[in-house]
Image (cartoon, rainbow, N blue to C red):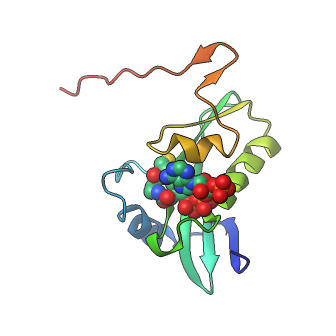
Amino acid sequence: MTDVIVRPAVQGEMPVIRRLIREYPNLLMQSDLPRIQSYFVAEHQGRIVGCCALQIYSLRLAEIRSLAVATDFVRHGVGRSLVDACQRRAEERGIKQVMAVTSSPEFFEKNGFSTFKRERIALFFDVPQG
Ligand SMILES: CC(C)(COP(=O)(O)OP(=O)(O)OC[C@H]1O[C@@H](n2cnc3c(N)ncnc32)[C@H](O)[C@@H]1OP(=O)(O)O)[C@@H](O)C(=O)NCCC(=O)NCCS
């Protein structure tokens, strides 16, 4: 969509970001969200219609988190533009690898992500919560 711009989020936009994330309670973590400085937002005529965070853990690894596009804006390239912005930020900061934990792997594959990289796969262990 041509009149959507992607830009870094600014102070005060966390409530609108939370509202977007709340549209997907079964897909996105609702707590322990990245800080505002990690986010990009997609804006259409003054309305925030998408958000995405790049959480940087180290120069070796960053993670795409809290990627959400408003339901009436999906499939118009907004998600791709947000992930592109995160990938560019990672490149600018010299980060080696960006990961995503997602139920939409096909979407990420279209942005150059893959499950297997150089004979390596990602494995997860859920730590028991006592
Ligand atoms: C997943 C999500 C971010 C995609 O955003 P979007 O703006 O609709 O995606 P885009 O329009 O930029 O799509 C880019 C490409 O991925 C494809 N795509 C989009 N969503 C897809 C999905 N769920 N499964 C497979 N392919 C998908 C599009 O068809 C498009 O392909 P094309 O270039 O060949 O036409 C959005 O549907 C969303 O917010 N989902 C709920 C939250 C979520 O799952 N977040 C990811 C967890 S980190």
Residue at the far top in the pictured view: 119
**Residue at point 37% right, 20% down?**
125
**Residue at point 56% right, 18% down?**
121
Q: Is residue 48 left or right of residue 128?
A: right
Looking at the rendering, which quadrant does residue 20 occupy? bottom left
Q: Is residue 109 left or right of residue 26?
A: right
Looking at the rendering, which quadrant does residue 1 occupy? bottom right
Q: Foreground: 55 or 121? A: 121
Q: Is residue 68 left or right of residue 80?
A: left
Point out residue 84 in the picture as x, y percentages from the top left corner: 72, 53
Q: Is residue 48 left or right of residue 20?
A: right
**Which of the image's four quarters has the C terminus?**
top left
Point out residue 127 in the picture as x, y percentages from the top left corner: 30, 23
Point out residue 11 in the picture as x, y percentages from the top left corner: 57, 69
Figure label count: 0
Q: Is residue 48 visible?
A: yes
Residue at the far bottom in the pictured view: 45
Quick check: 34 above or below 61?
below
Point out residue 22 in the picture as x, y percentages from the top left corner: 35, 63
* Quadrant of the rendered image holding ligand 1: bottom right
Residue at the far left in the pictured view: 130
Q: Foreground: 48 or 70? A: 70
